[in-house]
Image (spheres, grey):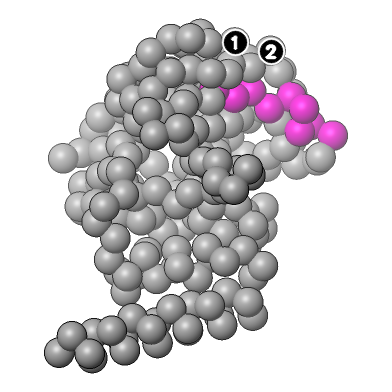
Amino acid sequence: MLYTNRLHIILLVAVIYMCSCAVSNNPQRNQIKQLQKGIIKDDTSFVYQLPFEKNTTHLLAQGYFSKYSHKNRAALDFKMKRGTTICAAREGIVVRVKEDGNKGGWNKKYRAFGNVIVIQHTDGSRAGYWHLQFNGALVNPGDTVKQGQPIGLSGKTGYTLFPHLHFIVWRSGNNQWQQVATRFKTSKGIKYLRPMRRYSNKY
Ligand SMILES: [Zn+2]
């Protein structure tokens, strides 16, 4: 039994390795696909809270490493109207706030206008909340925030086609930052989110 399990794991790792080379230069891409489908079960990573208010629901327009602008990003795009309250997905310390950007659109020239809040977690990883509206930060650098605490108002600043929250977590390892796929508590249980599905904070 143990032998079969081990063989299974070796085969799985080999398949993941081969697929990730063929499909994308980011080795995480295929692993995340398997996590999303429940083929790999990971139950040790931190459970994040959806980054919006309790009892609200939002469409995930883009998932980890999806086509378009996330090809090489373990990022999530939650579609939401401008001015929607964004909440901390995990507790931590605010290390960066930019809220003076007042332009946005589907052109790289708008990239520098993207407003953002970055929160550092106790394990050293960081979460970025992007495209907030002008003056849309409700916190300041140095603030300690709790999970679920309102931190900002969403918008459409920076390089973006439509109003949404771009959420991404990264950590440092081997002297470089690495993006991390995160799982969330949802109304349907704890999940690695998948694109074009609606996720709810009702539980
Ligand atoms: Zn995005």
Q: Residues within 10 Å of mark 1 (few under 14, many from 20)?
A: some
Asked whether residue 172 is in view, the answer is yes
Report the residue marked by disc 2: 100
Q: What segment is highlighted magenta in the picture?
A: 109-117
Q: Is 82 one of the magenta-colored residues?
A: no
Residue 108 place in picture, x, y as percent: 81, 40
Q: Residue at x 59, y 24 (%)?
A: 116
Q: Compare residues 178 and 146 and report the one nearer the observer.
A: 178
Residue name at image x 61 percent, y 29 percent: 131
The reply to whether discs 2 and 1 touch (Cβ–Cβ < 8 Å) is yes
Q: Give the amino acid at mark 2.
A: Asp
Q: Is residue 33 above or below residue 112?
A: below
187, 7: nearer the viewer = 7
Residue 44 placement (x, y as % from top left):
26, 52
Pointer 2 or 1: first along the chain: 2
* Residue located at (71% from left, 18% from top): 102
Residue at image mark 1: 135
SS of the residue at dot 1? loop
Looking at the rendered structure, the secondary structure element under dot 2 is: loop
Q: Position of residue 137 (x, y in %)?
A: 52, 14
The one nearer the camera, 83 or 132, is: 132
Q: Position of 108 compared to 120: left or right?
A: right
Where is residue 19, by image quadrant? bottom right
- Mark 2, residues whose alpha carbon is within 10 Å: few (<14), some, or many (≥20)? some
Q: Of 182 and 6, which appears nearest the observer?
A: 6
**Residue 96 lies in quadrant:** top right
Quadrant containing the N terminus is: bottom left
